Image: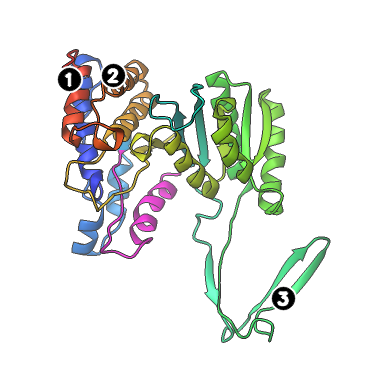
Amino acid sequence: MPGDGIGKEVVAVGERVLDAVSEISSFSYDGEPFDIGSDRYLRTGELLTDEDVSRLGKKDAVYFGAIGDPRIKPGVLEQGILLKMRAVFDQYINLRPVSSWFPLVPLKREVPFDIHFLRENTEDFYMGAGGTFGAGSPSASVRVRRGMYDVDIDLKGSSTGGDDFAFEIGLLSRRGVERFADYAFGYAAARGDEKVTLVDKANVCTHIYGMQREIFEQKSKEHGIGLEFMFVDAMAMAMIVRPETFGTVAVPNLFGDILTDLGAQLQGGLGMGASGNINPGGLSMFEPIHGSAPDIAGRGKANPMAAVLAAQMLLESLGHREEGAILRGAVRSCLDRGRTTPDLGGSLTTAEVGEEIRSIVLGGKR
């Protein structure tokens, strides 16, 4: 599913690379293209249709490019396609590895790190629970808890001057947090990590993140894996000064979106960031974390390495770990020899980087 902008270019590279992998290993695949994105929406008004969902549900995995188009209001494509797909297929884990791809790491300390962010992918503040109201609304009063007391605030009163308001609600379900925690501790155990780091803002958002902490503490005991807490602002600082101290990191949806972009910069930029939207028992989707970048679309400047690393994750999810390692090694070889796009200091085009990786996979090295 190439989607929009540079998504089409990097997915084309990924397909060529997967074809190469299929030539040298037992991996084989039959890829079906899906025309889902801005072009179809502008042509037909369709986002993610019931027919799309039915066809996608029969697949083993989805390989996704990017979504977004300046001709369309922000949020339409993202909510109607990407977020809907995550919800419909219950892809409740967003896996985003952050690795020290030296010499791309901008930190002064050359200490290797390998953080695997597990971002809860279906709840928190990305559920679309919100709205607007103002002085003309039938009811403009809210009850909030201030310390030990419930306080009614009249939003139509003189203190607000009859202002308009917008609100967004973060929601966590017990079931959602429990399965998130089970996955996180299971993932940490498989990686050999001694602890899970849970990132939140429980000192301010005491209700939703307080419940999350209680559940994670219980699951820590059940799994026999350690647990540490980090506030999101402290975590942002710690990622800069001591990223090597983190392994498996569990983070709610909104904060995960932000911290993993910081993580992408630590490993060389968005062009090195891959992700998986995981349903452990169902359909998962793999994609680079960068956007559609319409300003460079069609110019051969897009870095396809994140898409290739997403293909690596796709292979590993289907049980082809050796083949995934081959792709990762090919990316490493390109970086070592400076065979990259301009964003990483090289001079190759998107397609040329793809052919370089393909050549390495097939056993040659230019």
Q: Is label 3 or label 1 in front? A: 1
Residue 59 appears anywhere in the view = no
Q: Earlier in the sequence, mark 1 or mark 2?
A: 2
Residue segment shown in magenta: 63-90
Q: Residue furthest top?
A: 363
Q: Is residue 327 above or below residue 298?
A: above
- The residue identified by callout 3 is 153
- x, y (%) of residue 172? 60, 50
Dot 2 or dot 3: first in sequence order is: 3
Which quarter of the figure is the C terminus placed in? top left
Cα gap from disc 3 to disc 1, whole angstroms = 65 Å
| Image point (25%, 48%), residue name | 3
Name the N-terminal-most of marks 3 and 1: 3
Mark 2 lies on residue? 333
Q: Secondary structure at mark 2?
A: helix
Residue type, mark 1 in image = Ser
Residue 72 on image: x %, y % = 29, 64
**Colour scheme shown:** rainbow
> Which residue is most to the front?
108
Nearer the camera: disc 2 or disc 3: 2
Q: Secondary structure at mark 3?
A: strand
Pointer 1 with pointer 2, Cβ within 8 A: no
Query: In the rendered structure, which amino acid carries the disc numbered 3?
Result: Ile
Quadrant hosting residue 229 = top right
In the picture provided, is 290 more to the left or to the right than 126?
left
Quick one: 259 or 238, which is closer to the camera? 238
The label number, if any, that marks residue 359 in the structure image: 1
Label 2 packing within 10 angstroms: few (<14), some (14-19), many (20+): some
